[in-house]
Image: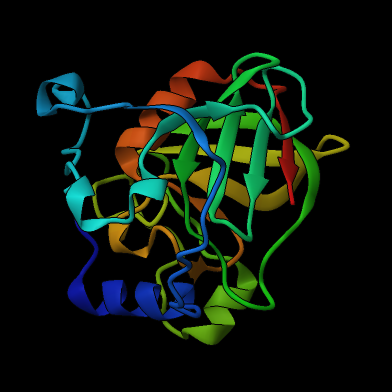
């Protein structure tokens, strides 16, 4: 089910930020392997997963195994908002690095949290701030390939309370590598599905 065109324009306006692409270099890779995806891999999804042409993006935003320079223990998610990278710490020596989009200037959130809950193909509910920025925006966007949260969402909590910040997929893959969101962390849907399968509720998340 797709949102009406007018509503989708309102959504884009509410989510818009500074689209300044960062080309800053990331960690040095331990090798040049990266995770590939195929349409067959996502054949059983509830909605279509549109595979991204990775050749159109800076190679630093490919899923790549790198040296663990985060200083965090295995099983931790670390988000570097400056370099637009998310790290899933696999061991004391290695981490999987993913390209992300981060919050636009003045909207970025930093701190430590845990994954309070997980949702596959979630519905999206605009915040009060978004509703003020885009009057008439729908109060609920149903799950689907045009939903701003994409295929998966990880909900960040502090002290048992929802922070309203998420790590999630996106219906706007061209924003990866930019400051584009309203504060949440966006990933390619393909990458988000893989990460979602690896991280349990309670996972520590550090956003720097």
Q: Quadrant of residue 63?
A: top left
Front one among 93 and 61: 93
Q: How is the image coloured?
A: rainbow
Asked whether the viewer can see residue 44, the reply is no
In the rendered image of this protein, does residue 104 appear above or below residue 124? below
Residue that extends furthest to the top in the rendered view of this protein: 91
**Residue 27 left/right relative to 55:** right
Q: Quadrant of residue 8?
A: bottom left
Q: Residue at x 40, y 69 (%)?
A: 138
The percent coordinates of residue 89 (x first, y second) are 63, 24
Asked whether the viewer can see residue 98, the reply is yes
Front one among 44 and 90: 90
Front one among 194 and 3: 194
Q: Quadrant of residue 4?
A: bottom left
Q: Residue at x 19, y 25 (%)?
A: 42
Residue that extends furthest to the right in the rendered view of this protein: 159
Q: Residue at x 50, y 80 (%)?
A: 18
The percent coordinates of residue 193 (x first, y second) are 37, 29
Q: Residue at x 63, y 57 (%)?
A: 81
In the rendered image of this protein, does residue 22 appear above or below residue 200? below
In the rendered image of this protein, does residue 40 appear above or below residue 103? above
The percent coordinates of residue 15 (x first, y second) are 46, 72
Number of numbered discs on residues: 0
**Residue 40 left/right relative to 115:** left
The percent coordinates of residue 201 (x first, y second) are 65, 21
Front one among 107 and 120: 107
């Amino acid at each position: 089910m797709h949102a009406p065109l007018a509503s989708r324009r309102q959504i884009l306006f509410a989510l818009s930020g500074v689209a300044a692409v960062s080309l800053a270099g990331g960690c040095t890779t331990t090798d040049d392997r990266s995770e590939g995806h195929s349409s067959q891999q996502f054949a059983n999804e509830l909605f279509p997963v549109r595979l991204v042409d990775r050749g159109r993006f800076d190679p630093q935003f490919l899923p790549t195994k790198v040296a663990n320079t985060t200083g965090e223990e295995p099983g931790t998610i670390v988000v570097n908002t400056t370099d637009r990278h998310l790290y899933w710490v696999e061991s004391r020596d290695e981490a999987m690095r993913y390209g992300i989009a981060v919050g636009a200037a003045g909207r970025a959130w930093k701190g430590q949290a845990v994954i309070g809950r997980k949702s596959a193909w979630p519905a999206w509910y605009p915040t009060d701030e978004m509703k003020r920025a885009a009057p008439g925006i729908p109060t609920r966007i149903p799950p689907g390939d045009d939903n701003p949260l994409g295929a998966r969402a990880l909900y960040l909590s502090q002290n048992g309370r929802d922070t309203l910040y998420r790590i999630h997929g996106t219906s706007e893959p061209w924003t990866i590598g930019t400051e584009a969101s309203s504060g949440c962390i966006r990933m390619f849907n393909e990458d988000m599905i893989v990460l979602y399968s690896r991280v349990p509720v309670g996972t520590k998340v550090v956003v720097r």
